Image (cartoon, rainbow, N blue to C red):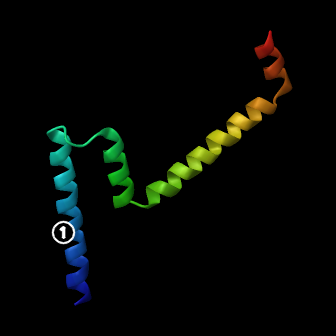
Amino acid sequence: MNKDRQSQITHLGTVYKWFLRRLEAIGQLSNTEKDEEEMHMNPSNIEDMESKLRDKQTAKRTQLLDENHNEARSR
């Protein structure tokens, strides 16, 4: 029974992806909606995006705290 359940989940994911591609092909799915659906289909992407966002924020914070950069910018 466990194998049947896993098979159902796999097939449902395949059909869901096919359906989303069809919606995108006819213009009924915006890029934002597509990104949200891809996140829903693969939760590990959320962790990757959050990690990239934290890295970007850290880089921006470091840049803002850099006195030489701030002096050059104020000129």
Q: Position of residue 30 (x, y in %)?
A: 28, 40
In the image, residue 16 lies at what x, y percent? 21, 60
Q: Quadrant of the N terminus?
A: bottom left
Q: Residue at x 37, y 50 (%)?
A: 36
Q: Residue at x 48, y 55 (%)?
A: 46
Asked if residue 51 lies left or right of residue 5, the reply is: right
Question: Among all residues in the image, which is located at the extreme front?
Answer: 28
16 in relation to 25, above or below: below
Q: Residue at the far bottom: name it.
A: 1
Q: Position of residue 60 (x, y in %)?
A: 69, 34
Q: Amino acid at mark 1?
A: His
Q: Quadrant of residue 56?
A: top right
| Residue at x 17%, y 54% (from the top left corner) | 18
The residue to which callout 1 is attached is 11
Q: Secondary structure at mark 1?
A: helix
Where is 22 relative to 40, above or below? above
52 over 73 or under it: above or below: below
Q: Quadrant of the C terminus?
A: top right
Place of residue 4 in the rendered image (x, y in percent of width and height, measured from the top left) = 20, 83
Tag count in the figure?
A: 1
Location of residue 61 by image quarter: top right
